[in-house]
Image (cartoon, rainbow, N blue to C red):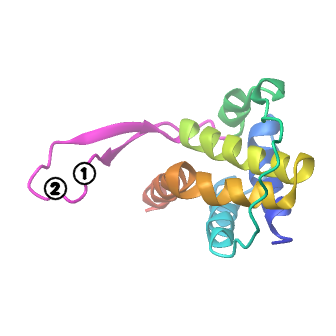
Amino acid sequence: MKELIPTINEIAKFGLQPDLATTDINRLLERDLINIYSLYFHIDYEFDDTDFPDFDKSQLPDIKQNLKSNFPDFGLYKIAADIDDIDNLNDNAIVDAIDDLTDIILDLLEIRWRIENNSLNDGLWYFELIFPSHTQQHILNLLNYLKQRND
């Protein structure tokens, strides 16, 4: 898991720093999202039941605004609301690539913060908790968005 913090940092920089001068930024993002996704399958920790302080998102810069400066062409896209309902071709949802990436970065920053300020086990526990219930779907949606834009 020593790749976790560096991979989080690679993704988080897109939301923490405005106007990054990076070539092929979409490809770098795609690579890093796949790396985080892969790391989820290697989580190994012992539960830490210490009563730790909570993560304070209010101290973060304006992640959404920074993402808009780094990905000015990201926008709204549609997804099937229920992919199992084959007969319903009209039930779509409109989602936002910037919102997807904002949520991913916030989740990852909390994982990093918990590792650095609470304990490795607390951070890995949170990764295991938040990934399948929140982060994973945003990553899948964003990867699909990136793929379809490249076609």
Q: Residue at x 21, y 60 (%)?
A: 84
Amino acid at dot 2: Asp
Residue sitting nearer the eye, 119 or 85? 119
Q: Is residue 150 left or right of residue 47?
A: left
Quarter assignment of residue 48: bottom right
* For residue 36, above or below residue 123: below
Q: Residue at x 68, y 64 (%)?
A: 36
Amino acid at dot 1: Asp
Tag 2 secondary structure: loop
Q: Quadrant of the C terminus?
A: bottom left
Q: Is residue 57 left or right of residue 79?
A: right
Magenta-tinted stretch? 71-97
Q: Are marks 1 and 2 in contact (CB under 8 Å)?
A: yes
Q: Residue at x 63, y 47 (%)?
A: 104
**Residue for badge 2:** 85
Is 90 included in the stretch rendered in magenta?
Answer: yes
